[in-house]
Image (cartoon, grey):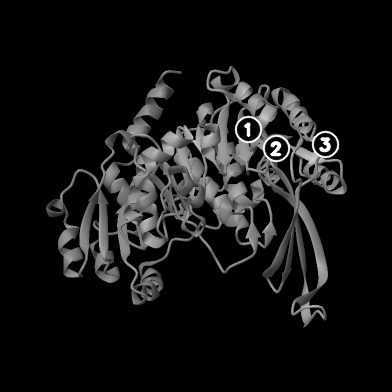
């Protein structure tokens, strides 16, 4: 399979390019049928002081591991789904909906002793009133044996495997043994296939040495036996436990999902990578984490860098979290979401007006600037660091004419509108503007940032902007310099590769 370039950014065309690759991805895990029942409440029942919900709508959709499979199929993957369901109406409905979504259900095991897990949520006016769970009290050994028998063929010659273990009892005994046998670190499959573990207890699968584990904050907390504080202190606390999380999960990378606070990616001997969610008004959404795992997996399966894959996954989760119920993010929906960031660069005056309410609420404004021509890992690492210096990150892009003056007549490679759209799509970036002056000093004087961040081998004394920043009451922060990831170095490698043909 072709591999996408390591220099891909979050452009509108990227989801379509991922779908064109059509990777084969096997999802193994706990299937759920999610029921979303909605109605109106106008009275209390006679028997008890409980509301009567007059149902107006009944929706059933695949949930749990089945939702991960549906999202992968919607993003263009060829998906095989391995799970255990009952020979009941819920199981039949779940299998039908998976097939309608383009998921291969030939490895889905229906067993007479099994009850298909179903979660009924009853809501009114956007508020869930009650959830009713129907599931097997115990998964029988013969059912687990049937599931185990389906696993080898399902994972044969696939590009990635997602292990979704929600502790529902289906990935136990012979089923677990079959997974370990097929996906162990020394197995032939693992020489080419990506393994992503999305489990309530990732430590159960640490012997597999997965490529990526994706616990949420609560699961990560249990993994290392430490409570993570709420608010701004949570990410530093999670980051401090990176060695323990990596060791306990056995994973090459741990991506901790933090709900409204985005995600934190941890790897050995590397800087952490943060994403920021874009939450709106509270909605009764469910399964955004499944969407995140699906988008992360397909991106990694076709060769995108982990940090780019995580950024793309955050964008996909942002699409579904704004909808009620359990839903999926399709290729076209993700492309439209990324496309909305085009033409989003604000004028300096518009930007100042947008920042005024933030400043009034006491939020710290961080300003940085640069060409950001061919986006690479050095850029995203730098911008993530800049975001963590405050609350609102503003990126000022050099105009095309100023890039030519700084870099030469053959630059920029990408025009300012395209550069602005890609930078704006990053979850850590709040606002983008373009400036055409020799230095950003006029912009600094207008915006009066609390922090001016600059990347490179500078000191504050070397920067012409320092005086203006300090005069406006701000501070200058010098961030990491990553010369091996510079745009010039990237272009040099591209030209060298071209000369070889």
Evaluate if marks 2 and 1 touch, with contact meaning CB atoms under 8 Å apart. Answer: no
Mark toward the start of the polypeptide (1 vs 3): 1
**Residue picked out by circle 1:** 21
- Please tell me which residue lies in front, 478 or 353: 478
Q: Nearer the viewer, mark 2 or mark 1?
A: 2
Residue 353 placement (x, y as % from top left): 39, 74
CA gap, disc 2 to disc 1?
31 Å
Residue position marked by numbered label 3 in the rendering: 110
Q: First in sequence: mark 2 or mark 1?
A: 1
Q: Which residue is mark 2?
A: 170
- Residue 151 percent across, percent down from the top left: 71, 27
Q: Is residue 144 above or below residue 345?
A: above
Q: Residues within 10 Å of mark 3 (few under 14, many from 20)?
A: many
- The local crowd at label 2, few if under 14, some if 14 to 19, many if 20 or more residues have their Cα within 10 Å, is many
The residue shown at (58%, 43%) is 293
Q: Position of residue 360 (x, y in %)?
A: 35, 77
Residue 355, above or below 94: below
Name which of mark 3 and mark 2 comes first in the sequence: 3
Whether residue 368 is visible here, answered yes or no, is yes
Label 1 – label 3 distance at C-alpha? 31 Å
Residue 57 image position (x, y, % from top left):
81, 66
The Cα–Cα distance between marks 3 and 2, rounded to whole angstroms, is 12 Å
Q: Residue at 30% across / 52% down in the picture?
A: 402
Residue 490 image-quadrant placement? top left
Q: Is residue 499 shown left or right of residue 298? A: left
- In the visual, does 210 lie left or right of 136? left
């Amino acid at each position: 399979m072709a591999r996408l370039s390591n220099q891909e950014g979050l452009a509108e065309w990227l989801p379509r390019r991922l779908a064109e690759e059509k990777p084969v991805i096997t999802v193994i895990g706990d299937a759920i049928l999610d029921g979303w029942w909605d109605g109106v409440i106008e009275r209390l029942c006679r028997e008890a002081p409980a509301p009567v919900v007059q149902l107006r709508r009944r929706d059933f959709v695949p949930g749990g591991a089945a939702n991960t499979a549906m999202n992968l199929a919607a993003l263009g993957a060829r998906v095989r789904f391995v799970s255990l369901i009952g020979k009941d109406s819920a199981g039949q409905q779940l299998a039908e909906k998976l097939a309608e979504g383009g998921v291969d259900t030939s490895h889905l095991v229906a067993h007479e002793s099994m009850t298909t897990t179903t979660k009924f949520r009853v809501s009114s006016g956007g508020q869930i009133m009650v959830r009713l769970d129907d599931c097997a009290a115990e998964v029988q050994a013969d059912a687990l044996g049937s599931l185990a028998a389906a696993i080898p063929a399902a994972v044969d010659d696939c590009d990635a495997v997602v292990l979704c273990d929600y502790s529902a009892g289906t990935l136990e005994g012979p089923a677990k043994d079959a997974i370990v046998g097929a996906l162990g670190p020394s197995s032939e499959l693992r020489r080419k296939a990506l393994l992503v573990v999305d489990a309530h207890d990732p430590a159960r699968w640490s012997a597999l040495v997965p490529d990526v584990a994706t616990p949420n904050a609560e699961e990560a907390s249990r993994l290392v036996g430490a409570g993570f504080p709420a608010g701004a202190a949570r990410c530093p606390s999670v980051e401090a436990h990176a060695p323990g999380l990596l060791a306990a999960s056995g994973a090459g990378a741990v991506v901790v999902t933090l709900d409204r606070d985005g995600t934190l990616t941890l790897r050995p001997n590397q800087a952490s990578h943060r994403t920021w969610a874009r939450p709106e008004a509270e909605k009764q959404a469910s399964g955004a984490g499944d969407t995140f795992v699906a988008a992360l997996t397909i991106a990694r399966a076709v060769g995108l860098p982990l940090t780019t894959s995580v950024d793309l996954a955050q964008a996909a989760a942002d699409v579904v979290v704004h909808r009620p119920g359990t839903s999926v993010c399709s290729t076209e929906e993700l492309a439209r979401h990324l496309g909305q960031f085009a033409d989003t660069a604000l004028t300096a005056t518009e930007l100042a007006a947008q920042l005024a309410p933030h400043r009034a609420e006491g939020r710290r404004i961080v300003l940085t600037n640069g060409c950001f021509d061919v986006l690479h890992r050095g850029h995203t690492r730098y911008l993530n660091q800049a975001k963590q210096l405050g609350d609102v990150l503003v990126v000022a892009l050099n105009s095309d004419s100023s890039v030519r003056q700084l870099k030469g007549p053959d630059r920029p490679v990408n025009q300012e509108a395209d550069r602005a759209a890609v930078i704006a799509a990053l979850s850590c970036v709040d606002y983008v503007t373009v400036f055409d002056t020799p230095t950003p000093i006029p912009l600094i004087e207008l915006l009066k940032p609390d922090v001016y961040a600059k990347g490179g081998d500078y000191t504050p004394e070397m920067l012409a902007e320092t005086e203006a920043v300090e005069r406006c009451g701000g501070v200058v922060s010098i961030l990491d310099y990553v010369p091996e990831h510079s745009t010039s170095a990237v272009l040099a490698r591209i030209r060298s590769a071209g000369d070889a043909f």
